[in-house]
Image (spheres, rainbow, N blue to C red):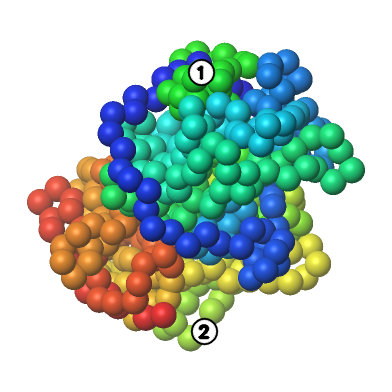
Amino acid sequence: MKLHILLGTLLIISSAPAMAQTPAAWPGSGANANIAWVAYRDGNSNLIQDPNDMSPDYIDLYYSAADPSSVSVAYDGSTTFYRFQLEASPIAGNGSWNNSTWIVQFGSATSGYMGAVYVNVVGNSGTIAVTDGSNVDVIYSFSANNTSPTGARVTQVPNASTYYLDFQIPMSALWSGSNTSLGLTASTIQSFYYGTSTAAGNPGQISKDFMIGAAVDFSTLTQTGFTMIGTGVLPVELTSFNAYRSDDMVELRWATATELNNYGFAVERTTDGEVWTEIAFVPGAGSSSTPRRYGYRDEVLPRAAQLSYRLRQMDRDGSVEYSPVVMVATASVRPGITDAYPNPFNPSTTVSFTVAQEGPVRLALMDATGRRVLTVLDGERLAAGTHARMLDAGYLPSGRYFLVLTAAETNSVHPVVLMK
């Protein structure tokens, strides 16, 4: 698959001045010596490719079917890194940056465009920034004749005539900046889309190679989260594990973002939280770079007021890893949040709740001031019964928080403590 580059416009209405940031060490150096650049791929696990068809060369991504790849991404736990392999250096022979824009858009197959980060050089100045499509937060500013600006670098690819353009953005700026609020966390499942422009260094006019309607086709790109690429893609990344009771059965559903040598999942159940029993085995996909969905129905329920489930994921080499625990109530309980386990938690917990009737459900995590810091469910339509959802608050500081559930005529609040 080739890199999809879309014709579109970003409306840049307002911007904030550069934030005071301390740049992180680049992947493979200093404190980040163990952080690796991860080559970005399409849904078939092929490297993203781009034909040698744009001019000038410093905006044309190098066509690469093998490492070193055309585009890469990295993450060290607090800073995100982006890499373009270009046909020529974006810094001209006179030591000044060429006017242009190198941009990475975020999106998903379901929500489309979510925001973007970019390096933009116009006239005598350059910026590294975050945009939500309307507003901008400038992270770093630099002079066009500064060949080593803060937050960006240009290096020649070893043993090649091509060049790397790298830049970095703090994870906190993707969550909520002073002027933008993308709401992206390290575990948000998304796709990365790389593009370039020479429209007077304007990030609102991106040159495109392959036109796909009027929007980026994010559905064909690998979907992942920053947490997965910190030291390379994890063997199996569980993105969700949910449970709900319907009539006289419990339905379990889970999903993975990527898999490597995944033999499968043993489904385990307990009535007392101590003795676990394997009740089923669901084969895995082996190795896959695309999201996978799984399910199992537990139709023979033991007598207990509450049932807990977990997955024992097994690799082909025999290694195992356990999922978080999800719980469902089997006895009649009042609508609302029934539990959060564990509590205190770090960094994830499973929220159990009951819905009295089918309809849209909203579940959010609030801080002590009442500010929403994490959305778990945003109007998702759920059947009547008991449900369980995982949440990951690894990017939040320790403290007291509140889970807030809204469903039909039900409003429920449950305190939790994040303890790191």
List the single residue furthest toward the front.
Answer: 94
Of 116 and 366, which appears nearest the observer?
A: 116
Q: Disc 2 residue type? A: Val
Dot 2 crowding, Cα within 10 Å, few <14, some 14–19, many 20+: few
Q: How crowded is mark 1: few (under 14 residues within 10 Å), some or many (20 or more)?
A: some
Q: How many labels does the image show?
A: 2
Q: Which of 398 and 56 is in front in this view?
A: 56
Q: How far apart are marks 1 and 2 (CA)?
A: 64 Å
- Callout 2: helix, strand or loop? loop
Query: Residue visible at 68% across and 32% down?
Result: 94
Of residue 141 and residue 281, the one placed in the foreground of this image is 141
Question: Quarter holding the N terminus?
Answer: top right
- Residue where numbered disc 1 is placed: 199
User: Considering only vertical position in the picture, is 321 above or below 184?
Assistant: below
Image x and y of residue 54, in percent = 69, 17
Q: Are marks 1 and 2 in contact (CB under 8 Å)?
A: no
Nearest-to-viewer mark from 1 and 2 = 1
Q: Which residue is at the front of the view, 175 or 358? A: 175
The answer to which of marks 1 and 2 sits earlier in the sequence is 1
Q: In this view, does 51 lie to the left or right of 161?
A: left
